[in-house]
Amino acid sequence: MHKKRPAASRFVLWAAGVAALGFVIYLGLNKGVFKKGLGTFPEMNVLLFTLDTTRADHLGCYGYPNARTPNIDGLAADGVLFKNTTAQAPLTLPSHSSIFTGTYPFIHGVKDNGGFYLGPEKITLAELLQKKGWATSAFVGAFVLDSRWGLNQGFDYYYDNFDFAKYKKISLDSVQREGGEVTKAFFDWFKTNGDRRFFSWIHFYDPHTPYEPPEPYKSEYAGRPWGLYDGEIAYVDTLIGKVLESLREKGILDKTIIIIAADHGESLGEHGETSHAFFIYDATVSVPLILKLPGANVKAKVIEAQVENIDIMPTLLDLLGITVPNEVQGRSLVSLLSGSRFETDKMAYSENYYPRYHYGWSELKSLRTVRYQYIQAPRPELYDIVRDPMERTNIFGQSGSLAERFIKEMKRIQEHSPAPGDESKAPRQLDNDTLEKLRALGYVGGFTSSARLSRSAGLADPKDKIHLYNRIKQAEGDSADREYDEALKKISEVIDEDPGIMEARQVRGQIYIELDRFEEAVGECRAALEIDPEYGAAIFTMAQAYRKLKKPDEAAAGFRRLIQLDPKDPKPYMHLGEISIDVEDFDSAISHFEKAIAVDPEHSAVAHNLLGSAYLEKKMLEPAEREIRRSLEMRAQMPDAHYNLGLLHEEKGDLQSAADEYRKEIEIHPAAYPAYFNLALLFAKTGDRQGEIENLKEAVKANLKFARGYLFLAKAYLDRNENFDEAIRLALKGLELEPEAESAPLGHYVLADIYNRLGRLSEYRAELEKSQALEARIRKR
């Protein structure tokens, strides 16, 4: 059982007229020492730490007894701790977008991780400081904050640089880096930029799942309730201490404004949710906020008033003497710091569209005060978070006037939301011919996503679906571990209970692909797209299934549909390029890869390599070599790049250089079976049959389903007039794997030749006939 959270507020005073309504009035009862009239700090550096997935109540300065966070606690002791801070979303990208723009998600438009982009028209904190002369830098720990999503606006240097080759699975959650790598990047930048007035943002993703802190934190915290989560936070605290020490050594710590914030929290089992992203109870949206000003302007101050993450931007601008843009909805907290302003009935807004976009259930919205939390849902919720900090007793039906106050405020906020159609991602409109073609292929259902998403009535309440959500996540985990039967069992149970969950359909479709059940995968994705025809994950999976079915036109239609929905995503262009190579349309392949590079030049190493391979197919050796080497410049261990250079050298007639490149490919990627195969063919050209056989053996060892490798190995034994039994076994294995492949006639010819030499004439004639019939079928294709 998770330890009870500390009460949200202990220093409140009731005014008689307001007490009847149940609202807390903040009357400035904050402990601490502060200097009246803070003034501005126009020459100060600014250092912003954002701690991903960090609950306020798991830090020592917020009363957590199991924490070891001395550096964060020290900043709180020397600065200002905001006791009641609310994040605007329980998701990384929307929440950071609110921090940097000072606006709610329905204003900046980023409502989910992935598929949403912070538009260039939005004004960010970094842009404003950059214009005023600050050197700006960012160092992020996860792909979910990659520059492609738009948060790099205003940063002179934005360290994302994720190497996708390290990861078996590419997803927003899986592509991350340890905090030590993040701080190293900061120190590298700081060495040459620390003498300038700077604004730096350091993002630590470590407290996010999976909880895998390095030693000694792993051993120290193992065995405790949620101990490894606490261990991750303790590790991050140590890294923060190292950064602070670097500023101290340079003599600029007292010239730097420091902020500790978090994008969202973590449920840790509360309300049935293990991690975050699904609910917006305090566990996922009540976050730490600590401000340390230079010198002793404000020290050891605890502010009980309700504040929000959107207040960070205007507060910093106010402290630095910079005008706050009109569109900013957050409010400067400087008057709270100086004690010149009292907070009355402040309400903090949060929202979560994840249940809606992924599962077709209702979105959630909340308003929080120091005393109460209201959640707008199909079954509304209201909690007294002072008396009930775990939010277990819903008092919505017991407090009519209080509930009505929250309802009216929520309506007022929603009136400021862009309308109508704000709930839709609003992709470009389709012409009728395209629409009919996509509908015929199953990529478009019978109604539009915009219509579905523009209504809330009738959508399921997420709290009634948490058990299904957890089951889906378990199935995804089993699938990632290649336990496909167990994954299929779990996801099928979910669909049996609720056939309308689009993500469950897509997950089952992906499992079917792993099981080579491609037609069933298409069927599952069609069912998902009947629910939401703009659900990109289902479109992507269905296009993959069509490609596996060797239906390139159908697959290409799906990837083109994805481009319509999200023109900034390079993946569909990449897949279209690969499909074009499959059908030997190399001009189209070149065009698609060039578009992928244009869309995302920073992460285009794979696209450059594939572009080089397309040029190679056209015998355009100079641009081919240029692109392949560009790929290796971007990623020294790029898979297939040295293999492609080997092909290029073979085209030039330089067999020794080709062999060297194939060996480099094998050295970097020991499972590179095509490199073994081509190296074997080079040995055959020089008459080295033993070298040929050894490399063919390695090829089939690296890929047990490499049919062509088995056939060529069988022929190599035949050419040496030895080991006929093994040659027969290998030829039969290759034919079993790909009986209709273009190389399959070779297998029949090898068998015929061996049977002829062994005097097995009837078998010889049978294999000869099979080879001739197969060749005739191949010619007709």
Image: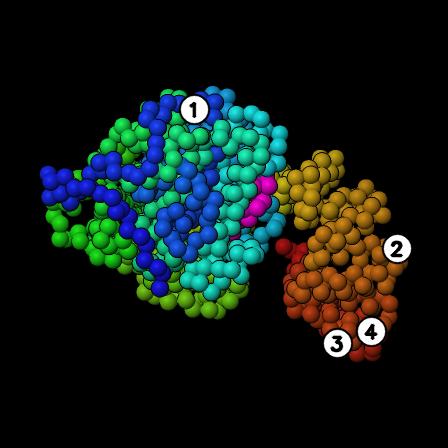
Question: Is residue 408 in the magenta section?
Answer: no
Measuring from the top left, give residue 533's x and y in whole percent. 38, 48
Q: Nearer the N terminus, badge 3 or badge 4?
A: 4
Q: What's under tag 2, amino acid-wise?
A: Thr
Q: Determine the CA span between mark 1 and mark 2.
A: 75 Å
Residue picked out by circle 2: 686
Which mark, residue 41? 1
Q: Residues within 10 Å of mark 2 (few under 14, many from 20)?
A: few
Residue picked out by circle 3: 763
The reply to whether the C-beta atoms of the residues labelled 4 and 2 are less than 8 Å apart is no
Q: What's under tag 3, amino acid-wise?
A: Glu
Residue picked out by circle 4: 723
Measuring from the top left, give residue 338's x and y in whole percent. 31, 29
Asked where in the image residue 214 lies, by quadrant, the reply is: bottom right
Circle 4: element type: loop
The reply to whether the C-beta atoms of the residues labelled 1 and 2 are less than 8 Å apart is no
In this rendered view, identify the residue nearer to me: 615 or 389: 389
